[in-house]
Image (tube, rainbow, N blue to C red):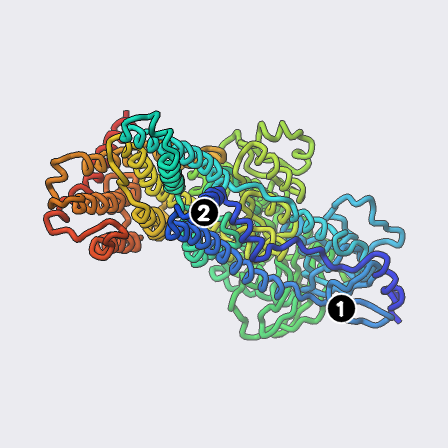
Amino acid sequence: MNKFGLTTEEASKALSEQGNNALTQPPRETFWDKLWENFKDPIIRILILALLVNVVFVYMGHGDWIETMGIFLAIILATFVSTYSEYSNENAFQKLQEEASRIRCKVWRDGEPVELHIDDIVVGDAVILEAGDKVPVDGILLDGDVKLDQAALNGESKEAHKLIAPPDFTWGDGTIDFLDEHKLFRGSVVVEGQGIMQAVKIGDSSIYGQLTQELKDDERDSPLKLKLKGLAHHISQFGYAGGVLIALAVMLHKAYLYGDFGAYFANTPLLLSDLVQAVILGIIIIVMAVPEGLPLMIAIVSSLNMKKMLRDNVLVRKLVGIETAGSLNLLFTDKTGTITKGKLEVVRFITGDRQEYPAFDVLPAKLKAFTYQNVVLNTSAAVSDGAMVGGNMTERALSNYVGSYRMEEMLHRDKFIPFNSANKYSWAAVSGNSERYCLAKGAPEKLILQTSHYWDAEGNRQTLTEEMKKTLDDRMLELAADAIRMLALCTYESDIEGDELPADGLTLVGILGIRDEVRPEAIEAIAEVQDAGVQIVMITGDRRETAVAIAKDAGLLQRPNELVWTSAELAEMSDEQVKLELHKLRVVARALPMDKSRLVRLAQEMNLVVGMTGDGVNDSPALKKADVGFAMGSGTEVAKEAGDIVILDDNFLSIKQAILYGRTIYNSICKFIVFQLTINFSAVAINFIAPFIGIDKPLTITQILWINLVMDTLAALAFGGEPALEKYLREKPKDRSAPIVSKKMLSTITMGGVYMTFIAILFYKSSYVDHLFRNAPDHIYTYTGFFCTYIFMAVANGFNVRVSGLNLLEHIDKNKGFLNVMALIVAIQVLLTYVGGRILRTTPLNLHEWSVVVLFGLSIIVVDLLRKSVCQMLEKK
């Protein structure tokens, strides 16, 4: 019977007293939860209010059921499109998560090894660990010797060596110390060795579990949602005020036409009838003021861009993530796999006489042979057909370094002594081809002291002087400052007694420089994101010197006043001190999970829009708390669960693309708002002025329905396809609390709205314009002309607001859908003049009348080009 582990009875008792290893899952939203949340959108709320009022009037016999159904469809379409997009993505994501979490572990029960699901482990269980296993609980090492990759927990790529805990070892007061040589933590991976650990902290009590529970924090409003709340507030004020004023204006106009104010207000039946009509018109104005197409447009533009982003290796789990990415002020990013490649590479080979070679292929023959032998024979990893299988990160880096190189006749390994922390080297005795010698591999600071010679480029053995050793030491110090780790390769030409290398007499083959290289594309992406006004802070578990070297290579550290903090330094600072210096921060080294959450919280308190990238369990609370969390595709399930966006290729370039798409969406939404509010502003103004100048129903209810619902829905598709332009990255991030309608947008809306109102007055009051159309008792040709002109002006204004410059067709080839949709609107409008009849108050026009309509419709382009020219002149001044 094995001396470790529990009996079935003991396991049952532990289960009843302390529970199992299952983690409490963060609450997940159902389809209906998401749908209900989308109904809380501020614009949707105004639409619902307008719908309820319309339903009441329809019930009373004074409303229009077509308009009521139109508003209802606008609400349903907008909410269901966004809900379905999020829910379908979330479902696909959950399936991936479930596949990844089917983990089984081996434990000792009743003296026998048995396989259990990870959730069934209890406190006291003896868990068997082998290379490649994930540690399933927090605990201590009872037997064996293992090396762990703890990057998922502390972000540090260096492997942690764990040793057997002494009999009197206790877990302690709960202080997190990932470097404790006896403690093992859930989520880390065994990269070398084997052992048995005792489960001490399980489930939610483990560090992994505690971090997952932090994912339940409430989320704050996204910047776009905050801006839309403000827009909804202003629109509702404008609509309500406009509705009331127009209702009053209608009543005063009716009284004026009656001729006697006193008699009019005494005529109760007539007064009530007119009052109902005035209130109905007021409600219509409120509905007109609300941009019904905006929620649908946001859903459409987000969904369209989600598909585009997936092609760029960006999986969007929550629509809000794309919107928010474009507003980022501050991005906290991890190092490994995001800025760096996430794997070690041999970047230099240095000989004893300081010759440096950039790659294995260019090494001299003798050095190449010794290096290859040291890689494949002096290793604890498995070797098949001269190639390494498995091994830790360093061994894999060496295997990649020698690549496909093979020796014609391979030597035989007679003896192998693995690496240990005391000697800091491994060695192997090899023989073959009438030769017998030893290969050594380990820490340069240890092996160089034991060398007396080196192999030169011609394969000759030369004396290694103390001066040469000093020169090598100096060079290695320079490389260490660039975050390059060194590994020395040596030979020994005689037999070795015992397990230790001799104190002198080794021959240096060379020193390998190993590093997790910065991704070349990440350097360019970081520069572009910084140029976009986003502050980037690298947070890593690496030591300060390594972090600084990587940050300099990546372009994060460029100026003397930029700050690098360690976790210890951060802990000593008050929240106010951190806030004062945060704008200069570029690197946090030796970071702990709580450091990330604290920095996110403080940045948000400063009203900044904060992004966080991460792949480990240690990153998940900060990913959840950040305004937008970017989880890495190769990261842990917990990190992906916490993120809004999953970067499938772990590449910083993809983060830059997410920011670009976010800004594209924001710009598309702003364009649509200008387009729609210009129409709404002019429609409200026309109906407000009409009673005072003797115009009855300048726009009918059914015409308003076509303008506000059908046309706006189509326009949402048109602006939703706008391309992601690199120029958006050169814009400054939008302030979180700034209104979505900027001064420039407001001037465009006002100018366009006033001009469209002016044209309406011309059509209804100018005899000159009236004479351009055929005469009819009811002016039906002129009224049809105005309705078509109004739609054509709206279409032309779409081209105006699509670009900020004077070239209205700029980048139109990247959004051909815009041309198609606008052409469709024009085609439908022409068709309506033939089939609309009494319903839409239209009649067919002749060629001359159509030419008048087209000229008046296009005139808004001339007006807006003049506005843009004046604005550009003023900006230059």
Q: Which residue is drawn at 35% across and 46% down?
A: 708
Q: Where is the N terminus found, in terms of image quarters? A: bottom right
The disc labelled 2 sits on which kind of residue? Leu
Label 2 to label 1, Cα distance in Å?
57 Å
> In the image, is residue 872 above or below residue 287?
above
Nearer to me, 537 or 842: 842
**Local SS, label 1:** strand
The disc labelled 1 sits on which kind of residue? Leu
Dot in front, 2 or 1: 2
Residue pointed to by mark 1: 116
- Coordinates of residue 782 in the picture (x, y in percent): 17, 43
| Quarter where residue 827 is shown | bottom left
Q: Residue at x 31, y 41 (%)?
A: 679
| Quarter where residue 191 is shown | bottom right
Nearer to me, 88 or 562: 88
Q: In this view, does 645 lie to the left or right of 134?
A: left
**Local SS, label 2:** helix
Q: How crowded is mark 1: few (under 14 residues within 10 Å), some or many (20 or more)?
A: some
> In the image, is residue 644 above or below residue 403?
above
Q: Residue at x 79, y 71 (%)?
A: 114
Q: Residues within 10 Å of mark 2 (few under 14, many from 20)?
A: many
Residue pointed to by mark 2: 51
Can residue 296 be spotted in the picture? Answer: no
